[in-house]
Image (cartoon, coloured by chain):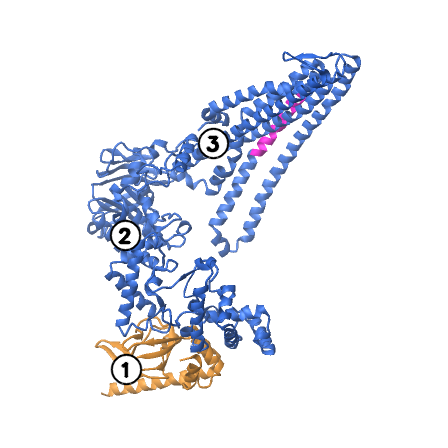
Chain colours: A orange, B blue
Amino acid sequence: MSLNEEVELLRKIPLFAKIEPSKLKLLAFTSERLTYQGGQRLFQQGDVGDAAYIIIDGAASVRILTDGGEIQVAELGKGDVVGEIAILCDVPRTASVEATSKLIALRITKELFFRLVSEFPQISIEIMRELAARLERTNVQLREALNR
Amino acid sequence: MESTIYRFILRYSKREQIFLFIMTVISFPFLYYSLDLPKRIVNDALGAKGATSFPVTFLGMEFQQLEYLWTLSGLFLVLVFINGGFKYWINVYRGRLGELMLRRLRYELYARILRFPIPHFRRVSQGEIIPMVTQEVEPLGGFIGDAISLPAFQGGTLITILFFMFVQDPVLGLAAIALSPLQAYIVPKMQRKVNALGKERVRAVRVMSDRIGESIAGVQEIHANNLARLMLARFSAQLGRIYDIRFEIYRRKFVIKFLNNFIAQLTPFFFYALGGYLVIAGDLTLGALVAVLAAYKDLSAPWKELLAYYQRKEDARIKYEQVIEQFDLPEIMAEDTQLTEPERPTPLDGELRASNLSQVDDDGEVQFEAVSLTLPPGSHMALFSTGAGGSEALAMTLARLTYPTGGRVTIGQAELHTLPEAITGRRMGYVGPATYVFSSTIRENLLLGVMHRPTGPARDDPEARAAIENAGKAGNSVDDPDGPWIDPATVGDGPDLVARLIGSLSLVELDDDCYSLGLRGTIDPGARPEIAERVLAARRSFAERLADDPQLVDLVEPFADDAYNTNASMAENLLFGTPVGPAFQPDTIAAHPYVRKTLDQVGLTDDLLRIGRDVAATMVELFADLPSDHEFFGQFSFISPDDLPEFQALLTRVERVGVDGVSEEDRARLLSLPFKLIPARHRLGMLDADIQSRVLEARAAFARDLPEDLQASVAFFSADAYNAAASLQDNILFGKIAYGQADSVSRVGTVIGSVLDDLDLRALVIEVGLDFEVGIAGARLSSVQRQKIGIARALLRRPDILILNDAASTFDASSQRRLVEKTLEAMSGRTVIWTTHRPDVARLFPEIAVMRGGRVVETGAPEELDREGRVFHEFAAQS
């Protein structure tokens, strides 16, 4: 896949939809595109976070280590962004992400990510929306768990 | 050492000096005759007075006037040759003698530095000592050659000439020396002041070199604290002092010179006046006056030489004395202690006992006192203290590096501080808190632990023999530094020695570091064909391993003659080899005429120019509005931020006149860009299949037509040949690690590791790593790695007693503990003393001696000491 195709793909992701193509091109050019085999981990819970990932192709599962062992809490697919929490709040990875099939991801380093967020308010809003949605989902889960 | 330079000269070169003196004396009659002849020629042969009648009898033969003239002139010519010959021979002999004596002096000074007591180095700096041995003694060599023969020769010449004058006419002779008493009185008086200034100058220059040395050692501090102005001001002040002194010396020297010249020119006045009167009065022949005047002209040369000699002598005397006083320390170690071989190997496996040991340093500070310790053979003891407990100073004394001021240390029957270093330096091991690593390979640094003396005959070639013979003449070491120094009886040789080296490396956990260095290292397949062969086997095995595993197959893209490697740059694809030397390096390859010719040949130049333009346009588009110090430039851009505006302008020009229209310089700039493209990494999609296949054509043409003189500039890739220019790792990979595969580098590393283990090659890679050059003072290693080398060096010779003086303090806690455990295991049955400030490290020892304020306050097993009321417990609680 060439750079231009990657840019096309990035434009279809809501997070980047409103960013001008030349910036997306810089994003794609300066990000590493990584291929994972099924079973390989993008990152491990507890590690220091230095990058976020945009899934270009394939699927992955988000796993959290509990007292009862590791459980899957979410599934990710093409166009999903993952790993941004650790770099946003400087905390260790809150979960592990494992490729469930052959997966291609764009690795965005912490520096580049912050640059994007500060330069494009649109991205910040999209990220806030995403985080708020996740919080809402978590609240629902919590309520269900308490009511059970 | 000899207290004055004359004593030194007489002691080591009496015979040569006498010989020179005799040769000088022999030359004088010839000199005298060469002075006398002109008179004969003028008076007799030319018959100026008409007193002679021809034929004359000379040397028993009869001569007519003209024949007589020819004969005398011929004789004069012969004498000129003989005098010149004498001068040449004496000068050469003198020069050689001076150099031999200088060599001896320098050697003696260096040998003394090696025997200085260690605490002395707290008082003198490198900056002071080095110029003494290198520069200050340099003029002494020249002087020593001249010391006796020059005054003898010039003084003799002077006397010969004076004698000649007196023979001609006593009055004229007197006139010539009339002013000498005045000179003899004034000149030394003035010289004394110059001498005093000379001493001051030597001291000032030493301070200056000390300043420079200190600034180099502390250069980080100067940068970090913005001290440059202060340093410059201080240095300037020091230069000012030297300037003042030197200027004063010059002034006074030139006054002396002026006086001498003045007096020398005054003398002819007497000749013309007195001599003229005598000639007119008929008491002197004109020939004699001419001869005296000629002789007087000759007189000024030796006179000047003598005066210069006098000044040089004073200079040399001062320099010698000033250097010697720095090297003649009363407490210097005896030469025998350092260099004498023991009559038989003496193990130090007896009981180590320190009795009432104390040490007070020069400032009266107590380092430790009343220390009594008994360590039976095989004891392992921790010397524990916090802060200034005195354990470091004690460890150095127990290692025989410093001397106690009271009490003594015995090992078995022997008193430690009277033993020669040939026993303590071989049977004991000591590692301090900051090991020095010499600028050489890791291998050599380890082996320094066992290179105590030559262990075999010196090299047997004429050159080496001559070098050693000359060294002997100057009283230097007659050991051959390049001969064998490693004793196979103690550490083995060949594979055994390597195994032992690797053993000590793995003990200090340096083997993994060496393994990585080895993978990056190169070998000479010509010298070690069996290694190259085994690496090729590893290459095949690695390729199979990857091909068989679908999880791994994409990790490396192997090199193939007929395929474009998308993980390699275009430069690598074209070259299909490793560049050797400057010709085809990545930065220069695009400009190389042969490369350009090859591109033209396959018709690639225009396409590459077009691609170069596209790359430049993309870079300008992506990076133009980034600040120039942005990290992306370094990581990703093909164009440095400084060059970006130029490329912008270049693109405008290209737009206007097309790629073909721009200047050759612009074309070269554009052409250099595609050479850096790596399709898999940059994903710009600019090198399409057509371009790639033509690069392959160019690759074939490049190799086929490569001129003879460029053959050595590239080591081509070949699937079944070892590439001497590439690292071991690249030889095993024979391809490029693929971009875009997660964790590819570490996964490839794991596969290589397991391949090497299967083929039993890991030790070999570590061995290649042993040849890693560590840089000046080990600068290319970390401080932990340097310490590890120091410990491995001491362990290599399996000492009877090992003293580690806070040697692992830079290690993290867990590796320090592992090191202690491994060392104690390796040293079981032999004595270990380990100073530490960490209670957890001390607890690993069966016995702990706790020091406080320079005294051992308690000793015992950790479980005894680690309870309420004990000092160790109290210290441990604090830390």
Which quarter of the figure is the N terminus of chain B placed in? Answer: top left
Q: Which mark is residue A73?
A: 1
Circle 1 crowding by C-alpha within 10 Å: few under 14, some 14–19, many from 20: few
Q: Nearer the viewer, residue B363 or A19?
A: A19
Whichever of callouts 2 and 3 sits on the residue coming sooner in the sequence is 3
Give above or below for B176 relative to B254.
Answer: above
Give the residue pinned by disc 3: B100
Q: Is residue B280 left or right of residue B102?
A: right
The amino acid type, in three-letter code, at marker 2 is Ile
The amino acid type, in three-letter code, at marker 1 is Val
Marks 3/1: CA distance?
86 Å
- Predominant SS of the magenta segment: helix
Circle 2 crowding by C-alpha within 10 Å: few under 14, some 14–19, many from 20: many
Q: Nearer the viewer, residue B623 or B21?
A: B21
Residue at horizontal 50 percent and vertical 25 percent from the top: B6
The amino acid type, in three-letter code, at marker 3 is Leu
Numbered-mark total: 3
Marks 2/3: CA distance?
44 Å
Marks 1/2: CA distance?
49 Å
Q: Secondary structure at mark 1?
A: strand
